[in-house]
């Protein structure tokens, strides 16, 4: 049968209309997340996962042995693809593999679906000696057992508070009959070396009770038996596992007043900042610094752990009040992973090529080994420096040293609270502040994840992969990525929730006969309440 010219045109028109309709459907129809994968889909996602690491991971360059281990594990996983697999199983396997890269910025996350893993419905905190069991908004184990999940109102309530589960038995010692230390060891398998010993980093994985059970070899259950202690006696309670845990706006300790509002935080000299910093907040802090202070009074403490996005206003405020005028402008030095589409123009604007710095800054950095002509790996870019950017801020409340006695002016000090939750912009602030004489870093070592990150979504499973696409050094040549920044005074995580943390820091400082030297470490513990 031969078609006429008009028939051929009509046939092509029908095919074009069908293709257009299909494209419209794919564009506007809700995309469904697959919970089951065929062997081909399973292998394709693993292949893309491995290719993303090879192309974009800076840690794969500086640690080739880790890349070889990841490659072998990924190929072995692809060869053993089952006929039909669950995406939650692939997520678990990829989490185990990505931990071999030892990248503190690497993560594997799956979109929230009904088949999400069961979690321990508690928030755990470590005080240096014991683990504390906290419940969100007062949920007790009996209430959790009856409902089977945390109240939906708590998920939407941004003022949800985490409190001690049982005041008479504050410490959790066992889960499902195993000592908590056994669960801590299991959680460390998913952590990079820089945060393996961090209780703040361990908390996330301790809540992933169903994954840890599988690693330890325990059977699947929908509840857990926890053992609580007061140091002398113990009790056991059964808690039903949940699929979601609301993030509390604050954690309160017994006999510790709440410090939610800015006015209350200023009164306690404990300011908690996040990515949304209002200019009025910096004005209030400037006015607080301008007030005369008595000798041996507690320093102003600012919690910067939740700051992730660049904060030029805050950085400029800190440098204006605590920086030294003749200090170098370089905060740190970055090398990013080169790939086929990478360009220096894609970096944030606050990075500048070392070759474009002034003569004195260049000479300083070259003497520390940041010489682009001598760099060892072609897989990494030329050195890029992050500088203090001159930002105009409202400097009206700035400290006037002429109206304040000299002795008082010298005592104006700042404590920045950090731990392994401190990453991205928080670490850049800590890196800049560690060389300022009137600023002390307090807490535990930071995460060691300052560089830009590469993100990709695996097409079939919907799993999101995130990698560090660069490595960062301090201006004196020390590697920060994967190592972190150590504090001058060590303070355990549970002390950060105490509104009197400034007094705790002051007590530790008064116990030392000499002012702390940069690079030394002192240990501060909180009083048991």
Image: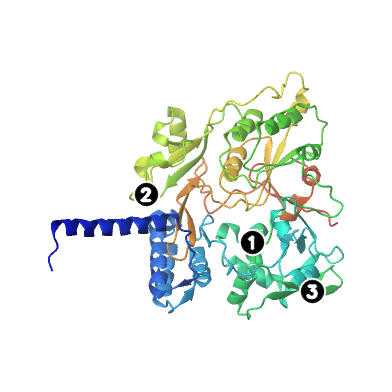
Q: Is residue 435 above or below residue 467?
A: above
**What secondary structure is found at the residue carrying circle 3?**
strand
Q: Which label belongs to residue 338?
A: 2
Taking the image as shown, residue 407 lies to the left or right of residue 435, namely right
Q: Which residue is mark 1?
A: 204
The CA span between labels 1 and 3 is: 21 Å
Q: Position of residue 243 (x, y in %)?
A: 64, 66
Q: Earlier in the sequence, mark 1 or mark 2?
A: 1
**What secondary structure is found at the residue carrying circle 1?**
helix
Q: Position of residue 185 (x, y in %)?
A: 63, 69
Q: Is residue 529 above or below residue 414?
A: below
Q: Which label belongs to residue 237?
A: 3
Question: At 76% across and 62% down in the image, what residue appears?
Answer: 135
Label 1 neighbour load within 10 Å: few <14, some 14-19, many 20+? some
The CA span between labels 1 and 2 is: 32 Å
Q: Is residue 54 above or below residue 334?
A: below
Q: Residue furthest top?
A: 402
Label 3 neighbour load within 10 Å: few <14, some 14-19, many 20+? few
Q: Position of residue 151 (x, y in %)?
A: 73, 62
Q: Which label belongs to residue 503?
A: none
């Amino acid at each position: 049968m031969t078609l006429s010219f008009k028939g051929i045109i009509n046939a092509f028109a029908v095919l074009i209309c069908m293709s257009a309709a299909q494209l419209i459907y794919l564009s506007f129809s809700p995309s469904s997340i697959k919970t089951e994968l065929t062997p081909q889909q399973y292998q394709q996602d693993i292949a893309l996962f491995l290719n993303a690491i090879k192309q974009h991971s800076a840690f794969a360059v500086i640690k080739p042995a880790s890349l070889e281990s990841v490659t072998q594990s990924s190929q072995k996983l692809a060869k053993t693809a089952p006929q039909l697999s669950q995406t939650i199983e692939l997520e678990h396997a990829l989490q185990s593999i990505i931990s071999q890269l030892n990248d503190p910025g690497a993560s594997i996350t799956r979109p929230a679906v009904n088949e999400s893993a069961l979690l321990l419905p508690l928030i755990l905190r470590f005080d240096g000696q014991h683990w504390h069991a906290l419940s969100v908004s007062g949920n007790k184990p009996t209430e959790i057992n009856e409902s089977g999940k945390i109240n939906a109102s708590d998920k939407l309530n941004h003022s949800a508070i985490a409190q001690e589960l049982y005041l008479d038995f504050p410490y959790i010692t066992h889960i499902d009959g195993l000592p908590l230390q056994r669960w801590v060891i299991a959680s460390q398998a998913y952590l990079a070396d820089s945060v393996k010993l961090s209780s703040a980093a361990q908390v996330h994985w301790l809540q992933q009770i169903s994954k840890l059970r599988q690693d330890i070899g325990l059977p699947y259950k929908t509840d857990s038996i926890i053992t609580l202690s007061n140091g002398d006696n113990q009790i056991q309670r059964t808690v039903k596992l949940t699929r979601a845990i609301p993030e509390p706006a604050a954690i309160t300790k017994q006999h510790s007043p709440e410090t939610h509002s800015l006015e209350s935080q200023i009164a306690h000299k404990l300011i908690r900042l996040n990515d949304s910093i209002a200019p009025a907040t910096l004005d209030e802090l400037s006015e607080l610094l301008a007030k005369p202070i008595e000798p041996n009074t507690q320093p102003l403490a600012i919690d910067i752990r939740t700051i992730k996005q660049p904060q030029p206003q805050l950085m400029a405020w800190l440098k204006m009040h605590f920086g030294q005028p003749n200090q170098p402008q370089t905060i740190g030095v970055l090398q990013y992973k080169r790939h086929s589409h990478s360009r220096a123009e894609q970096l944030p604007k606050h990075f500048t090529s070392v070759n474009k710095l002034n003569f004195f800054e260049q000479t300083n950095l070259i003497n520390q080994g940041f010489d682009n002509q001598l760099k060892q790996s072609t897989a990494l870019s030329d050195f890029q420096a992050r500088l203090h950017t001159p930002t105009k801020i409202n400097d009206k409340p700035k400290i006037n040293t002429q109206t304040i006695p000299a002795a008082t002016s010298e005592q104006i000090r700042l404590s920045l609270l950090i731990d392994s939750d401190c990453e991205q912009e928080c670490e850049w602030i800590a890196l800049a502040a560690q060389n300022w004489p009137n600023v002390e870093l307090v807490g535990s070592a930071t995460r060691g994840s300052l560089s830009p990150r590469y993100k990709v979504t695996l097409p079939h499973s919907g799993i999101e992969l995130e990698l560090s696409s660069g490595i960062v050094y301090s201006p004196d040549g020390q590697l920060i990525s994967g190592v972190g920044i150590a504090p001058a005074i060590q303070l355990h995580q549970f002390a950060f929730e105490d509104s009197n943390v400034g007094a705790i820091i002051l007590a530790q400082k008064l116990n030392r006969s000499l002012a702390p030297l940069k690079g030394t470490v002192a240990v501060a513990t909180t009083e048991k309440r």
